[in-house]
């Protein structure tokens, strides 16, 4: 756990816990604004999974969930690590 993880809001912590229960890891996690404790999370999963998550205090915007309290963003991208390489490796 990184030191700044203590500032993750309950809304995003709930979503992370739900993903971990399904064995879906975060592909990226970083604090994007230290003053407001705003985080950015990227998940390599089909955005359709958003429909199966249970949360309050956030909005769905396209393939992202944005919390109302700190404007933290969780972005879902179905492209896997392998699909992102043009050379097919």
Image (cartoon, rainbow, N blue to C red):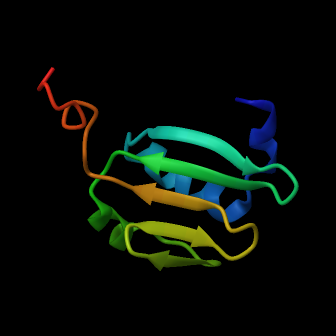
Residue furthest right in the image: 35
Q: Is residue 81 left or right of residue 3?
A: left
Query: Is residue 69 placed above or below 6 in the rendered structure?
Result: below
Q: Tag count in the figure?
A: 0
Query: Is residue 28 placed above or below 37 in the rendered structure?
Result: above
Q: Of 84 and 59, which appears nearest the observer?
A: 84
Residue furthest left in the image: 88
Query: Is residue 50 placed above or below 16 in the rendered structure?
Result: below
> In the figure, residue 2 lies in which quadrant?
top right
Q: Position of residue 12 (x, y in %)?
A: 62, 59
Query: In which quadrant is the C terminus drawn?
Result: top left
Residue furthest top in the image: 89
Q: Position of residue 36 (x, y in %)?
A: 83, 60
Residue at x-position 33% and y-position 53%: 77
Residue at x-position 31% and y-position 63%: 47
Query: In which quadrant is the N terminus drawn?
Result: top right
Q: Of 43 and 11, which appears nearest the observer?
A: 43
Residue at x-position 67% and y-position 52%: 39
Residue at x-position 35% and y-position 69%: 52
Residue furthest front in the image: 86
Q: Is residue 83 left or right of residue 60?
A: left
Q: Position of residue 67 (x, y in %)?
A: 64, 71
Q: Of 38 and 12, which appears nearest the observer?
A: 38
């Amino acid at each position: 756990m990184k030191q700044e993880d203590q500032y993750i809001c309950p809304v995003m912590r709930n979503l992370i816990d739900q993903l971990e229960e399904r064995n879906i890891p975060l592909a990226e996690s970083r604090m994007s604004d230290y003053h407001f404790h705003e985080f950015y999370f990227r998940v390599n999963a089909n955005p359709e999974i958003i429909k199966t998550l249970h949360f309050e205090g956030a909005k769905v915007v396209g393939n992202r969930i944005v919390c109302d309290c700190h404007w933290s963003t969780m972005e879902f991208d179905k492209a896997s690590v392998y699909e992102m390489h043009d050379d097919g490796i």
